[in-house]
Amino acid sequence: MSNQTDLASVWRGLWDVLLKERPPARVVARQRYYPWLVIGTVCIGAFMGQADASVAQLVLPVLERQFDQSLSAISWVAIGYTLTLGVFLPIFGRLADLFGRKMLYTSGFLLFILGSGLCGAATSLDMLVGFRVFQAIGAALLQANSIAIVVTAAGERHRGRAIGLQAAAQAVGLSAGPAIGGALIHALSWRWIFWINVPFGLAGAVLGWFVLPKTGLVDPDRRFDWAGVAMLAPTLAGLVLMINEGQQWGVASPAFAVCALAVCVLLPLFIWREPKISAPLLDLYLFRRHAFWAGNLAGLLSYAMLFGVFFLMPFVFDRAYGEGPLAAGLGLTVIPVALGLLSPISGFLYDRAGPRALTASGMVLSLIAFALLELVMGGEGSMLPTLGALALFGVGQGLFTSPNNSSVMAAAPRGRVGQAGGILNVTRSFGTSIGVAAASAVLSWRLAQATGGPQGTLHASPAVMLEAAHYVLALFALFALVAAALCWVRPEINPEHSPADGAE
């Protein structure tokens, strides 16, 4: 009996040391500007997450040379990360309500920097993909908790300014990522795009421990939808695998059949089960609202285009234009810079005009940008016109993203705003995975047809590379057309307040 008591004491001690939340340092908490210290700490994670997401696309041509693998295999460096994010975001959002946001957020920093260090040390592609998945678990812990910490710290009076600061940190990270990554690859090696995360992540973890407040109210309802996780995760993974690997496997292969069976069985089961339980992983009731499902689907297509372009263009710059990583990184920067400049303007206009015209116009501009890329890409002196078309694409994304996200949240009843935010996060991550997988699949297919060789870009001539890239752009143009139609036909939502509970 004494041994059991001692063991219980040890476990309680470990809980107190490792998991139990501590209050912030007194010298920090008593400062008048303390809430802004909390928001600044969260902005570190926001910057790192977006910088890592954008720079990971830039390094793919280098990794293709380094590991001499097929394009579909290399793409999993990006897809494994975003897919893991999509699966774990709703899980960690719920666990934060059960165990506290501070503990999970600081743990996220530690997992992220450990995963980053391991990614930089990877000696094979399989190791790198595995470590990227591990890194994404840390990133999911950060993203799932950040908005709740910011909103709580800022209070009602400063909520808009605080969310704006976090969005600005994300925009700066997305903009700076390609340029920083290109410089690191050019001056050092691809490994440093991961190792650079370590000192910043350590600073974020230390600040998080001493600055972030304890979670005020922890949900006493300890139920968690593990069965929903067991159905959703294989469904998302199976769908992405079918898109990315279908060309290489063949539709008659056993692997493709297993993935198709998982999607066709588990997805309907998930949709049937979730509304019937009291604590679902995702509140599918929200999809009964036209503005909600249309906005989420348009957002999925938008993120698919954005990160699909981030995947495609480094190969175009490298293989077709003969540009190095530094020039490619600077070239890609025009997209997030344009997006970041337009986002505050579109948010301001949304408050006055609503989402329909802004979001539809943004997708039409994206469609025009793809048409321009089809015309100018590959011609003599085409680098500058290509950058101009990419900037126009960034403008379209900037007009679309902020009003679309705001309208999706406004479509949710007041009591389901948290669930709506979780679904929006899943949609964003899954759309990113779909975009990279689709771009990889179409590019691999056209290159294999044209060269009759391996499904990669290493053995393709500049002309063949550009011809294959045009097919990817045509697919994204179709995405933009569908998204524009969804934006135009969805009902307007009053920007100033959400609909009442129960309204359809």
Image (cartoon, rainbow, N blue to C red):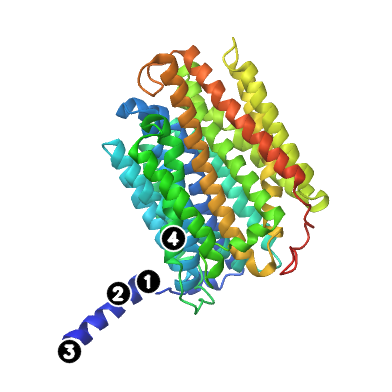
The image shows residue 212, relative to residue 265, as above or below, that is: below
Place of residue 87 in the rendered image (x, y in percent of width and height, measured from the top left): 46, 54
**Residue at point 31% right, 36% down?**
125
Q: Determine which residue is flagged by label 2.
A: 14
The image shows residue 42, relative to residue 330, as above or below, that is: below
Determine contact: label 2, label 4, CB under 8 Å.
no
* Amino acid of disc 3: Ser
**Between 211 and 238, the one nearer to me in the picture:** 238
**Distance in Å between CA atoms under marks 3 and 1:** 25 Å
**Distance in Å between CA atoms under marks 2 and 4:** 28 Å
Q: Earlier in the sequence, mark 2 or mark 4?
A: 2
Asked whether residue 269 appears in the rendered view, the answer is yes
Determine contact: label 3, label 1, CB under 8 Å.
no
**Distance in Å between CA atoms under marks 3 and 4:** 39 Å
Place of residue 69 in the rendered image (x, y in percent of width and height, measured from the top left): 33, 28
Nearer to us: label 2 or label 3: 3
Q: Determine which residue is flagged by label 1.
A: 19
Q: How crowded is mark 4: few (under 14 residues within 10 Å), some or many (20 or more)?
A: some
Query: Seen in the image, is 476 located left or right of residue 123?
Result: right
Where, by quadrant of the figure, is residue 255 drawn? Answer: top left
Q: How crowded is mark 3: few (under 14 residues within 10 Å), some or many (20 or more)?
A: few
Q: Determine which residue is flagged by label 4.
A: 229
Where, by quadrant of the figure, is residue 81 drawn? Answer: top left
Place of residue 492 in the rendered image (x, y in percent of width and height, measured from the top left): 79, 52
